[in-house]
Image: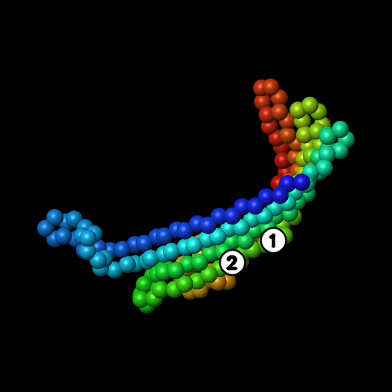
Amino acid sequence: LEVGAWYETYEFFQRRPLYNVDPSSGEILQGELPIVIYYDRHFDSTVTQLFIMDTLKLLDEKLALQAGVKGLRVEREFTGIANLDDFNRSATRTTEKTDSDWFQPQAGVSYQVGASTQMFANYAENFSSVPRLAMVAGGGTWERLQPETSKNIDLGIRSEHQGWRGYVALY
């Protein structure tokens, strides 16, 4: 039985100021306040993932069965001037979005055909949270976005020999 977890916090800042230029030298006057800040984006993300998996081996360990489940939660917070719409209105905003799916089953089977050849089949469900930059889209479109989900099945055969290795799979 395998049990695991992943926890990550991530801060990302993106800022675009416009500064005056010294008329005699043409150098940017970074010591002064910027004329304008087109956008000032601050993202805080927290990712939590948990999984549990078990493996059962049968037929002199030629047949391996694996089953498990994983869960994922992605929390994002945005603060700042998101885009040109916010800039034109002299507005800042704070928004939050949380995407999660705590039940993503996974199952697999493999059979050792010979010393170096194996047949396999797998099923997995996954999801990917809404991208962080979607939170700065104009018109509120990001609020309607949903995480991308998938159900994957793959079947195949893999072989490894002294001079080569390869596999053929149907996904």
Q: Position of residue 14 (x, y in %)?
A: 40, 60
Q: What is the secondary structure assignment of the residue under circle 1?
A: strand
Query: Residue 142: percent from the left, percent from the top?
Result: 53, 69
Q: Given the current orientation, which residue lies at the most extreme bottom position? A: 89
Do tag 2 and tag 1 residues touch (Cβ < 8 Å)? no
Residue 55 point in image, percent of width and height: 79, 43
Counting other residues with Cα less than 10 Å from the Cα at mark 2, is it few (<14), some (14-19), or many (20 or more)? Answer: some
Q: Is residue 72 above or below residue 96?
A: above
Pick out the residue farthest to the left: 24
The kind of residue tagged 1 is: Trp
Label 1 neighbour load within 10 Å: few <14, some 14-19, many 20+: few
**Residue under the image location 86 percent in, 33 percent down:** 60
Q: In this view, does 122 lie to the left or right of 39?
A: right
Chosen colour scheme: rainbow
Dividing the picture into quadrants, the one containing residue 28 is bottom left
Left or right for 74, reference 65: left
Element type at mark 2: strand
- Measured in 3D between alpha carbons, the distance from the residue under mark 2 to the one under mark 1, in whole angstroms, is 13 Å
State left or right for residue 155 relative to residue 8. Answer: right
Q: How many callouts does the rendering have?
A: 2
Residue at (52, 61) in percent of width and height: 45
Label 2 amino acid? Answer: Thr
Q: Is residue 15 visible to us here?
A: yes
Q: Where is residue 83 in the image (x, y as percent from the top left)?
A: 41, 68
Question: Residue reaching furthest right?
Answer: 59
User: Looking at the image, which residue is at 81% across and 40% down?
Assistant: 64
Q: Which of the pair 120/68 is nearer the observer? A: 68
Q: Can you say whether 27 is above or below 41 in the image?
A: above
Q: Mark 1 points at which residue?
A: 102
Question: Residue 125, can we see it?
Answer: no
* Residue occupying image coordinates x 17% and y 56%: 26
- Give the labeled residue for mark 2: 98
